[in-house]
Every structure is written in C-alpha cells, then in structure tokens.
Amino acid sequence: MKRIYLDHNATTSLDPEVLKAMMPYLTGEFGNASSIYECGRMAQKAVVEAREKVARLIGAQSDELFFTSGGTEADNWALKGAAEALRDKGNHIITTVIEHHAVLHTCEYLEEQGFEVTYLPVDEYGLVDPAAVEQAITDQTIIVSVMYANNEIGTIEPVEEIGKIVKEKGILYHIDAVQAVGKIPVDVNAIGVDLLSMSAHKLYGPKGVGALYIRKGVKINNLLHGGAQERNQRAGTENVAGIVGFGKAAELSCDNLIETAERLTRLGDRLAKGITEKMDHVRFNGYPLHRLPGHVNVSIEFVEGEALVMSLDMQGISVSSGSACAAGSADPSHVLLAIGLPHEIAHGSLRMTLGKDSTEADVDEVLTILPRIVEKLRAMSPLYQ
Amino acid sequence: MKRIYLDHNATTPLDPEALKVMMPYLTEEFGNASSIYEKGRVTKKAIAEAREKVARLIGAQSDEVFFTGGGTEADNWAIKGAAESLRDKGNHIITTVIEHHAVLHTCEYLKEHGFEVTYLPVDEYGLVDPEAVKQAITDQTILVSVMYANNEIGTIEPVAEIGKIVKEKNILYHIDAVQAVGKIPVDVNAIGVDLLSMSAHKLYGPKGVGALYIRKGTQIKNLIHGGAQERMRRAGTENVAGIVGFGKAAELAFDHLSETEERLTQLRDKLLNGMMEKMDHVRLNGHPIHRLPGNVNVSIEFIEGESLLISLDMKGISASSGSACTSGSLDPSHVLLAIGLPHEIAHGSLRVTLGKENTEADVDYLLDILPEIVQKLRAMSPLYEAYLKGEGNRV
Amino acid sequence: MYSEKVMDHFSHPRNVGQIENADGTGQVGNAKCGDIMKIDLKIEDDHIVDVKFKTFGCGAAVATSSMVTEMVKGKTIEAALAISNKAVAEALGGLPPQKMHCSNLAADALHEAIKDYQKKQAQ
C-alpha cells in the first residue's frame, strides 16, 4: 500500500539530496571537526559551510548560529541561558499559553528556580495580542518568548509587531521558530529577534540536529558545558553528518521557499474546501489567513481523534490529532483548549500538515477516504445520536 | 596516499554495518517515534531494540538507558541533574583533576551556583586513590564523579573499588565511561554505579548521540525540558537513525569485545616497544598495565606536539597531542600536567589510539616514519641543542 | 588550517641551524607556553650576511622562524629592525587567529639577536 504522509509538522522525510550530502560524513570523512589533521579539517570546513547555509535561510550572519542536538535543546538553551545571564536584571519572563512544551516546561522549570512567568492568552484563532505583551511588561521583565508559528493550529504570530514593543523596552526577545523556518520567509533582522530556535528535521533535514541563533553581542549562559566546540558556547563533538544535512536542507528550502509555500497553500485550501463540502459539523482551527502553508487543523464533531488517526492509518494515511489519547496524556492539546475549544471538540481534532512531497492526488485520496471514516465513526458515536 | 587513522579516542569511523541499519531511518522510515500511526510505531520499535542493545553492553536493564545528544550532554545531565535533585541533602561534589572538560566545566558551573567541588589529584600514572576519595567525603557530599578511563593517557581508574566506598556512604556515583564502553568490559552492577555516561561515536557509532544510564530508583532532575520523549526524562524528537546506529554499534562491540581488546592490546604493546627501541628520550604517559587497549601516549622530548602532528599528517597519519596549540588554548593538556609532566614535556606529547580497523602494517608504518620526523624536528630544536651541549635537563 | 606558504616553510624550513661565534643571538619564548625561538646572526658592515634559526614549537612557530630568516638575509640592521611579527605573518599569507599571539614571535627573536649584537659592539 502506498502511504500518504500528512504529518510534516511532526517530522519530515530526509530529502534525498540531503542524505547524499551527508553520506561522505557517514563513511570516509568521519573525522572529529576539532582535530587538526586532514579528515578533521574536512569536517570542520563542512561545518562552516553548513553554518553559512543555515544563516542565509534566516538572514543571519554565520557566526550568529550555534548548532545543537535539536529544537528542544535550542529552546532550553535560549530560555535558561538568558534567564541565568540576566538574573541580576530581573526575574520576569513573558511567554504564551500555546507555546511548544519545550518552551512551556522550560518556563515551569525556571519558575521552580524563582523566576516569574506570565503566560499570555491567545484569541480564538490562536493569535497573541501585541498590546497584551506590552501590558505584561514590568521593570522586572528580562525575556519575551513567543513562537513564530504554532505547530498544532498553524497560526503565524505577529512576531514583528511584538518585536518592536520588546526591543523598545530593551528586553531580550526569543522566538521558537521550529515550525516556521523553511516554510515561510524568516528574517531575524526584520523581526529584531535576539534568539531564535530551529530544528533540521522539520525542514527535510536529519533528526538530532538543530540550531540557536544568537544575535551578535547578546550574551547568554551556556547550557552544555565541556569542550570548546561551537566557539566555546555549546560543548560536545560536532554531529558533522547531521550538521551538513541541516545545511543542505536549509539551502534547498531557501532556494524553493516561495514556490513551495504557494503550492502548499493551494493544496491546503483544496483540502479544507473539500472537507467543508463533504462533511458537516466540522470547524477549522487556527487563523484562516496568517497560517502555515499546507496546514489544516479541523475539529470533526462527534468523533474522537485517536480513532480517526488509527482509521486513517489503516488506510495508509499518516496524520495527527490533538486528542489526549494520541498525545499520551489525560488532557487534549493545550493549544486547542487555549483557543477555547470545549474538551469534546478538542478530542475530535485532526491535524493534516502537507509537505513538499504532497500532491493533489494525495489530497483527493484523503477527501475520498476521510468522509467515509467519519461517517462510520459517527455511526457508532453516542454523541452523534 | 593511503591514510592511517590513529585517533580513535577522538572519534571512530561509523561501522558500515551500523550505517546499513541506519539507512532505512534516513530514507523511508522517517516517522516521528512519538506518533501513533504505523511510521511512528516502526521507529518506536527500532528505538526500543537499540535501547536493549546499549543496555546489554553495560549489563543494565533497557529501561535504565536514556538517549541523549552525546556524551557531553550525558555528563552535564548526570552532574547537574544529581546536584539539583540532592541540593537539600548537601552541596559537596567530589571529582578528579583529570576528568574530561564535560565534567570539569560542569563542576565549575555548579561551583558558581553554590556547590563545593573537591578535585582529587592523581598519581604519576594518572590513577585516583580510592583512599583519597574516602577521605574527601564529608556529610555534605552528594555526588562522586570519576571517569572510567582517561581519554588522553588511557589509564583505567579503580572504579569498582571507589564504587564500594561511595556506596557504603550512600552517595550518588557517576562515571564518565565515554572512553571505556565498547573498549573494555563495563558492568554497571559490578561497579555499583548510579549514573554512567556513554557516547556512540567513540565505539563506531554515529556522532550526535549518546546515553545516560540511570540506575532504577535514582532520581535526578531533567536537563532538557519539553516533550515526553525518553519516558519524560529527556525531551526532543528522537534521533532515530542515530539511536539505531548506536544500538548496532553497541551490539557489534559486545559481540567482539574480548577479541578486539586482546588484539589492540598486542598492537599497542608492539607500537610502544617499537617507539622505545627506535627513539631515545621518550616516556610513556599513563599506567603501563591498567590502560585502554590501543592507547599509546608518549612524550617525545625536545619537540613540540603540533609540529609532530602536522608532520605525521603529511605522511598520511592522523594522531593527536596534548600540546596547547592543538587544543587551541595556551596551556598543554590538564591531564599531562596533572600527572606531573613539566610544560615542555607535556607540549611534546603524542597520543596514538588504535582501533579495530588498524593492522600490524599500520603500526609498522608509523614506527618506520616516526623516528625520522622526530630526528628532523629535534635537529631544529633549540632545546635539543641545549641538551646536546649539556645545558638541558633530562627527564 | 595553515596556508600553503606556511606549510611550505614548515616542511622545508630555510636556514635551520646555528652559527658558530655568531655576532648576535636572540632567544624568545619559553617551554611553558610551548614556543622557543633562537636566531643567530652574522653581521658585516651593518648588513646581515647570514642567519640561522632553531625553533621548538608548532607549525606556525617553525614557519615564522623560517620566513623571518629569508626576509632578513642581506638586509641592513635598520631594515631588519623594521620587520614586525605582523609583517612576517603577512608574508606567510596569514596565520590562524589563535596563532597570532602565541606562535608569532620570530621577529622578536630577530630583534633580540640584533640587540645582542649591538650590545657586543658597544662593549
């Protein structure tokens, strides 16, 4: 059975060109990038080139980029490193209720360490109000952390407007851009951001590698201590193959960014329109306009998300859900609750995230299969009765 | 020119078999291991199998193994996580002066945060005295962290003896075993260790993945917060290919451990004896017997390490040195200074670490070219000139 | 890491050795920091007619020593004194940043040798 993968916000397949670029570093060029002999120098050069490519994707200079083991480490580093470095200045952090757990749980950790955290609410579309950010700022505020685009509902936040407010007050600004980078244009200077987290495997790069952008002149404490790698700011032998793969993936997405975004927006609209036409009692989650290309999050009333995901899986379609069962926790997605969905509606949410390998045929196939599954599940739902 | 890689303590080539099992996860099986659909289930199963293999290599149960982004992260996690979790019990940490920077710099970080750290000295062979550990323990001591084997001089520490002392006092025991696992038998239960750090790329696995062994029942705080991966103890989407590669590398190491250990020990001794025969003013660093198979660390008097490395590199040989220049700092290796070498002797150190693909011919080639290079460098060394004139100090 | 020129001077160092009864000898650096450079000069009519060096140190240390001997041969003392460590590094096509301080001492050794010569002359 040919499988249709519609969960690109969870992870993406490794681009074959990326794998090709990585292969030398998984075979002959295995040197430690810190070594001075030939194969070490080759590895070092490869890391330098990758850094340039990732920097270019977000409009940064290459010496502002630091590779990590992933987006989660980048978020942890940014927040803990900044909080520690600025502890003398204040103890207040502002973030939002719809952040990824990498930000939320790090903030909770910082609360245990004596920091105060304000979690800003969002509106029904998942948008953060820049005025709310401004009002939340106190003379103790040291960091504002807002995600660029939400992983579940795809809403793109007004990061530039927020940036203006934050920079006016001279506060450090962190953006979790894991879901945005590679999907939409991101320019660190246009936003005025100080710290920005990225992940390779969300943009057709390998898992196990990410990066933190640190604006020149911004000082944060290290998260991982040890060797002198990453210019003394992130210890640990460089994951050369992973870094090279990230670089290649960044280059590829940089080259095709606008055209891929446009195509996926059209495909996403086609999917959403089809769902509306073929099913009743559905509602779309997230902001209709400023949203990630190819991102559809829909609540299908009277059905439960995990059942939906499993039924689609049996038909060869991979998607995800904000359902509690799917996430392995007792509550449904904190994001869906934050935009005001009642529990039972949140449980019935379906997230379909298209990627560059998605085709019109994939969308049409889903539009054929999904209504049948929903009908079947609703037929056994007491709520529907 | 055929290149000979003799720097296996820095990193190892990825075993082709490990790469082979990684390939599916770099191509079609790219699913996120946390997803419930088929692609996710496949990767989840692969991770579970890898975990079992890594656990078996150190005699642990698989639910005691937690994957990380590498050995450095494992060290950071173990030490910071333990310190934070035990802060109410005490604030004293014991470690040694010859630890890897991943341990030393983490301890320095903790010192800034109110912890007291005792750095135990080592003897001329780099050995930690278990008795010294015992004496350093106070009622504030919450953690003892000792490396299993030193990355530079190859000395294997008396970790089981230290373990007995530490466990008697009911103190948490961490071992940085990055250089030991896969090279010599490691058994977490025989040692009685609570936390043990590992790295895949030191044992023919991929870079960017490591693991922390956490004994069942041991509570330490998380280092990386976020998603529920690694049973809620280490957040971040699993590096599936990396983890699978680590698993295969661990399996291969386990299956061939004693035979490789024996062969590399023989090769090591051949190399060392050859060096001693062919050159004068050479001294071995580290313990002559309690040392890693394949580790040769010598100080070659009157010459400087980086010059030696570049000269070897031009002849196709990759090795390393404790020289300041190669480490990018002003001082030579802290390990070589800790075993009592004077600066100029430490600067002239050469570390050759053999690995499973090395042959007797590799060793012969090195023995063939090294004396010539040393002679050439000594001919331009003012220290050697002074020595010949009788002004220099011999070691 | 190193330029081709550095590698050339490292692999084929010029003017290695010592001069018997040198007119001036200069030595800088110490074993602690990992670099020692010694330069011997033979001087006639205010001109450097021969120069030899010995160096204990890294690739950059050897290459800068070799380069400075080439730069200085046949020069007047005044011209030799004008040669800076920076000029030596530039003549080699540059050095890695971390080498600029610790291993770029060859001109200092040269200047010490000239000072030694001048001191002897004054006596």
Image (spheres, coloured by chain):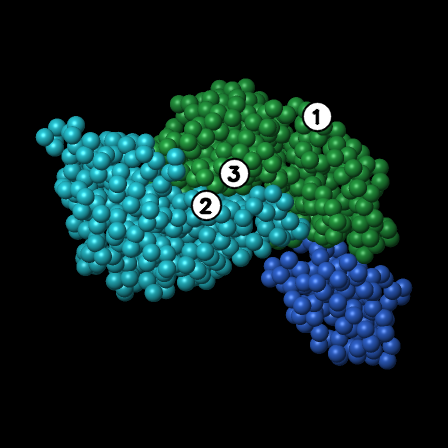
Chain colours: A cyan, B green, C blue
- Residue B23: image tag: 3
Rendered location of residue B16, percent (x, y): 60, 36
Crowdedness near tag 2: few (<14), some (14–19) or many (≥20) residues, C-alpha within 10 Å: many
Rendered location of residue A92, percent (x, y): 27, 51
Question: Could you say whether the residue bearing mark 1 is in a helix, strand or loop?
Answer: helix
Lower position in the chain sequence, tag 1 or tag 3? 3
Quote the CA–CA distance across marks 2 and 1. Answer: 40 Å
Question: Could you say whether the residue bearing mark 2 is in a helix, strand or loop?
Answer: loop
Q: Residue C84's quadrant in the figure?
A: bottom right
Q: Which is more foreground, mark 1 or mark 3?
A: 3
**What's the amino acid at mark 1?**
Glu
Question: Could you say whether the residue bearing mark 3 is in a helix, strand or loop?
Answer: helix
- Whether B299 is drawn above or below B311: the answer is above
Q: Label 3 lies in what chain?
A: B
Rendered location of residue A175, percent (x, y): 33, 54
Q: Is residue C69 visible?
A: yes
Q: Quadrant of the C terminus of chain B?
A: top right
**Residue ranking furthest to the right:** C20
Residue closest to the eye, B253 or C107: B253
Q: Label 1 lies in what chain?
A: B
Is residue B156 found left or right of C27 in the rendered image?
left
Residue denoted by label 2: A14
Q: Which is more foreground, mark 2 or mark 1?
A: 2
Residue denoted by label 1: B262
